[in-house]
Amino acid sequence: MSTASIEISGHLISPDHYIDGRRVSSAETFELFCPIDQRLLGHIAQGGENHVDAAIRAAERAFPAWAALSAAERKPYLDRFAEEIGKRADALCTVESNDAGVLLSRMRHGVVPRAMLNIAWFAEHALALQERPIDTEQAHHIVRHDPAGVAVIITPWNSPLMLSTWKLGPALAAGNTCILKPPEWAPLTCSVLADAAHAAGLPPGVFNVVQGTGPNTGAKLVSDPRIARISFTGSVPTAKWIAQAAGANLVPCSLELGGKSPFIVLDDADIDQAAATAALMYRNAGQVCLAGTRLLVHENVADDFVARMRHYVERLVIGDPRNETTEVGPIIHPRQVERVKGFVDRAIAAGGRVLWGGAMHPFGPQYYQPTLIANVAQTDEIVQSEVFGPVLTLQTFTSDDEAIALANGTDFGLGGVCYGETTHATALAERVRTGFIWVNSFGIRDLAAPFGGIKRSGIGREGGDWSFEFFCDVKDVVVPKQPFRASFAHR
Ligand code: NAD
């Protein structure tokens, strides 16, 4: 039995699970709403104990044969998977701009091509992975990267297609079988991914999707002792819960979490470029983990910077993300709108001065104005907590040391941005305690490079070889070069 498909602009999307190569429905469902106009999009299958169990069994059954293939033998499956994603570009763009409110233009030109590359790049990169010999005087070491088993992948709503494929690519290419738990506020592109995998001929059980809410379905998946890896992107509170569940079974987990990243502008920066890039932080209504949300600007250039940034912010096109020209869309959910409003209201009550924004936007009930708050102290909630909305803070500094103290003065450590004369900005960037930082730029993400955060922003790195290190069991097969004679050393 299957639940009725969800129709979005002519595209029919299954709301069901995808387990063992076929669609499986649930008696229990939950509602899915569009963040743009609050219309009910449909009812999504809620994964229960039986679905979680069926998916794990299917993934376990499929594992030995999939793991036994060489990377070269798995590659054609994954290349076809990437192609099938490409064939569904229209559906993926339309669907994610409707259920997550992601900009259609960004989906078309950025996310979908990247989703294809996430699969194809890791399939190619895995060819070089299988064995890394180490030769010493005593022995030849065959260092193998063996697939770990069943990998559970859990992703958030702000970029479901991009983040799911970024984890699925290396997990599958390394020979694991996977269970994807999509975000309940934006689950539909993950369902389209299941169609793409099916059409690509991935063997049943190699890739499964179990829909459901976090505390329900997600919690069951990550607590199961049969799984070998958990790759999670999401919030800090959920990560703490998952880490405990994983710890109980000693299952390795990779945690990519929130951020409160500094955006530093030195007094030798190209102020106009810095201001234009800072305005980009409002893209996706600020629902971007790696955004530089704390503007730290040298006092000498602060007035000029704010004036130029205001110029760019006033020109942002706010509206329906399905229009190609829109630059800022809605906030995902009414609960998230309340959260954003609460942060701003408390910041104002604590003495914060709103330089622009600070209120709802007239486009609709899930739209908030791009906001900048000055007159904030380092210890203020608005400086220390991730808002995950279109809200930035402004602080000034007079020396490099002060900039570093402000930049490093939160519990987070995901990313950062540093604008200034290149040598100066690079030297300063090296002192910022985060997993990555962009010098005179923003958002460059090469698949070969490591990605992840420190402190409360996460544990572990994914990307390039780091993804394979996580999704594989590394094994050293030691072959001595001389005949080995068993003897006690003291004799
Ligand atoms: P969330 O933690 O609420 O949910 C993320 C996922 O976890 C969802 O699929 C949810 O269903 C699931 N989940 C919730 N409770 C669970 C449980 N007990 N067991 C298993 N799974 C559970 O996060 P969100 O609100 O969806 O996403 C926003 C957060 O994600 C922000 O903090 C943002 O910074 C972070 N994020 C980080 C990155 C990164 O790469 N570092 C990227 C994007 C988003």
Image (cartoon, grey):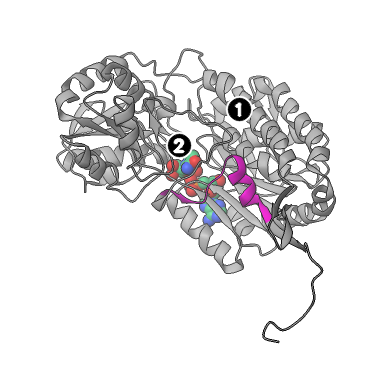
Bounds of the magenta segment? 457-473
Q: Residues within 10 Å of mark 2 (few under 14, many from 20)?
A: some
The answer, for residue 196, to whether it is visible in the render is yes
Q: Give the answer, above or below, for where 326 lies relative to 332.
A: above
Residue 88 percent location from the top left of the image? 70, 24
* Residue 114 numbered mark, or none: 1
- Write down the quadrant of residue 432 in the picture: top left
Q: Give the answer, above or below, for where 113 lies relative to 50.
A: above
Residue 241 percent location from the top left of the image? 49, 59
At horizontal 51% and vertical 41% (from top left) the residue drawn is 451
On screen, residue 412 versus residue 18, left or right, reads left
Q: Earlier in the sequence, mark 1 or mark 2?
A: 1
Q: Amino acid under label 1?
A: Arg
Q: Amino acid under label 2?
A: His
Which image quarter holds the N terminus?
Answer: top right
Q: Secondary structure at mark 1?
A: helix
Q: Residues within 10 Å of mark 1 (few under 14, many from 20)?
A: many
Can residue 466 be found in the magenta stretch?
yes
- Write down the quadrant of residue 140 in the picture: bottom right
On screen, residue 224 versus residue 427, left or right, reads right
At horizontal 54% and vertical 37% (from top left) the residue drawn is 449
At horizontal 77% and vertical 46% (from top left) the residue drawn is 206
Q: Residue furthest bottom?
A: 491
* Residue 401 numbered mark, or none: none
On screen, residue 261 versus residue 31, left or right, reads left
Residue position for label 2: 333
Q: Determine whether the beta carbon of the residue marked 1 sits less than 8 angstroms from the nearest atom of ligand 1.
A: no
Residue 325 percent location from the top left of the image? 47, 12
Q: Nearer the viewer, residue 40 or 74?
A: 74
Q: Nearer the viewer, residue 329 or 175?
A: 175
As measured in the structure, the alpha-carbon distance from the residue carrying label 1 to the one carrying label 2 is 26 Å
The answer, for residue 4, to whether it is visible in the render is no
